[in-house]
Image (tube, coloured by chain):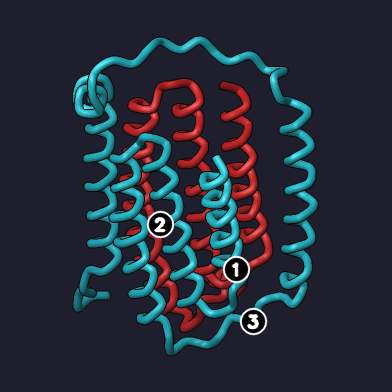
């Protein structure tokens, strides 16, 4: 439990750093580190498939996409951020953490657990047999993403 | 069960709140999208945390895998949009988008 808590604190810290850091590249790398920690947390929760997806797709592919976008938009002007961010963000975040802790402490054992049936089979059984319609949705979403990117990067006609 | 669930709910809520604060306070389009990614991390942690606490880890895993696929598609489309916006306005400032006409 101590290791899990340390990993979760690391996840929150890297995520906050990703938002707070001024340099976009450092932010993207921070986000990748947070994804890596989340993947390890998934592994420790007996969810290896989710962990593998989190590390390979989110920490790998999405970070590459972010770095590519940062490289393609590098020549642009630096966006002037509000100076208030430096103190408003930590202040509000710490206040929220305190409220969050108090609310969770207050709710402990007050809300009963919902009944859930015991799981049988393997991950493959659940994914391919139990959640078949999700896979159809996934294919639709991937195709929508591909067509959206193609539409956004298509070459202009002579008439445009 | 509930103790474990509140433990993960606490951290997931912190991640979602950090992301929402980032969305409210930042002006750089890429930063805004990083904030959305942080919120997505909070949601996937909550999904798997709930499955773990209720001993339904297999269903939670399938939901997280589906969520990650949707996330990748969203990221690819949004980053393509950001690059197109940058080509049009030569800036990543979200305030300049409000001034566009036509």
Q: Is residue A143 visible?
A: yes
- Mark 2 burial class by Cα count in 10 Å: few <14, some 14-19, many 20+: many
The location of residue A158, given as percent across then percent down, is 19, 78
Numbered tag placed on residue A82 in the rendering: none
Q: Residue at coordinates 79% horizontally, 42% vertically from top-left?
A: A99
Q: Residue at coordinates 31% horizontally, 40% vertically from top-left?
A: A48
Figure quadrant of residue A104: top right
Q: Secondary structure at mark 3?
A: loop
Q: Chain of mark 3?
A: A
Q: CA distance from mark 1 to mark 3?
A: 16 Å
The location of residue B74, given as percent across then percent down, is 37, 52
The location of residue B16, given as percent across then percent down, is 60, 47
Q: Is residue B99 visible?
A: no
| Residues at discs 1 and 3 both on one chain | no
| Residues at discs 2 and 3 both on one chain | yes
Residue A74 vs residue A89, the one in the foreground: A89
Q: Which residue is mark 1?
A: B98
Q: Colour of chain A?
A: cyan
The location of residue B73, given as percent across then percent down, is 32, 52
- Mark 3 burial class by Cα count in 10 Å: few <14, some 14-19, many 20+: few
In the displayed structure, A118 sits above or below B65; it is above
Q: Colour of chain B?
A: red
Q: Are marks 1 and 3 in contact (CB under 8 Å)?
A: no
Q: Is residue A17 left or right of residue B37?
A: right
Numbered tag placed on residue A80 in the rendering: 3
Q: Residue at coordinates 30% horizontally, 54% vertically from top-left?
A: A57
Q: CA distance from mark 1 to mark 2?
A: 36 Å
């Amino acid at each position: 439990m101590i290791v899990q808590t340390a990993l979760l604190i690391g996840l929150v810290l890297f995520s906050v750093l990703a938002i707070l850091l001024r340099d976009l590249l450092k932010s993207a790398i921070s986000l990748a580190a947070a994804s890596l920690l989340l993947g390890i947390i998934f592994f420790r929760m007996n969810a290896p498939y989710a962990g593998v997806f989190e590390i390979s797709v989110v920490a790998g592919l999405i970070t590459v996409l972010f770095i590519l976008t940062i490289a393609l938009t590098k020549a642009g002007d630096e966006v002037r951020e509000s100076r208030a961010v430096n103190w408003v963000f930590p202040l509000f975040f710490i206040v929220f953490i305190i409220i969050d802790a108090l609310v969770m402490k207050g709710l402990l054992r007050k809300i009963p657990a919902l009944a859930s049936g015991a799981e049988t089979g393997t991950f493959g059984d659940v994914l391919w047999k139990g959640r078949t319609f999700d896979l159809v949705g996934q294919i639709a979403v991937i195709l929508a993403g591909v067509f959206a990117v193609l539409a956004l990067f298509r070459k202009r006609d002579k008439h445009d | 069960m509930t103790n474990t669930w509140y433990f993960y709910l606490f951290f997931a809520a912190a991640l979602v709140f950090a992301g929402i604060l980032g969305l409210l306070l930042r002006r750089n389009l890429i930063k805004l999208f990083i904030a959305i990614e942080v919120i997505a991390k909070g949601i996937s942690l909550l999904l798997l945390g709930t499955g773990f606490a209720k001993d339904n880890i297999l269903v939670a895993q399938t939901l997280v895998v589906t969520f990650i696929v949707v996330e990748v598609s969203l990221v690819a489309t949004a980053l393509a949009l950001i690059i197109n916006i940058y080509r049009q306005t030569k800036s990543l400032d979200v305030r300049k988008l409000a001034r566009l006409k036509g």
